[in-house]
Amino acid sequence: MEAQVEKLKQQQKEKEQRQTSISDSELKRINSIAKLEQSLSLLENNFDVLKNNKSIIKNDAELKIRVEILKDRIVDLIDNL
């Protein structure tokens, strides 16, 4: 019984060590992915706001230019993926 308890303790300790041995580069990659997912979610939500206000954008030259610049930036990003 004690041997089994010791074995379980050792397995738990090894498991914890594996979990804490994430390299800095892997941690940075995970962090970058999380930021990208958050950014995409914000972009999707903000896109809906833009889409729902098309008439305002159409009637405001400055807003229309800003949307066109954003479109060019998005197309450039997609082309370079």
Image (spheres, rainbow, N blue to C red):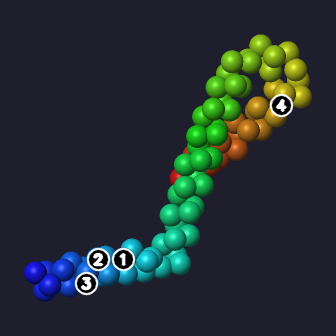
**Above or below: residue 30 compared with residue 62:** below
Q: Residue at x 52, y 71 (%)?
A: 27
Name the residue beneath numbered marker 3: 10
Quarter of image, res 44: top right
The residue sitting at the front extreme is: 1
Task: First in sequence, mark 3 or 4: give its number.
Answer: 3
Relative placement, left or right, of 29 versus 8 is: right
Contact (CB < 8 A) between labels 1 and 2?
A: yes
* Residue 65's disc number: 4
Which residue is tagged 2? 12
Task: Tell us which disc is closer to us: 3 or 1.
Answer: 3
The CA distance from mark 4 to mark 2 is 59 Å
Mark 2 touches mark 3? (CB < 8 Å): yes
How many numbered discs, if any?
Answer: 4
Where disc 1 sits, the SS reads helix
From the viewer's perspective, is the residue at label 4 or at label 1 nearer? 1
Precedes in sequence: disc 4 or disc 1: 1
* Amino acid residing under circle 2: Gln
The mark found on residue 26 in the picture is none
Residue 52 image offset from top left, x and y in percent: 69, 18
Q: Nearer the viewer, residue 65 or 53?
A: 53
Residue 45: x and y, percent?
A: 63, 32
Task: Name the residue at 64% across, 26% down.
Answer: 48
Q: Which residue is mark 1?
A: 16
Is mark 4 in CB contact (under 8 Å) with mark 2? Answer: no
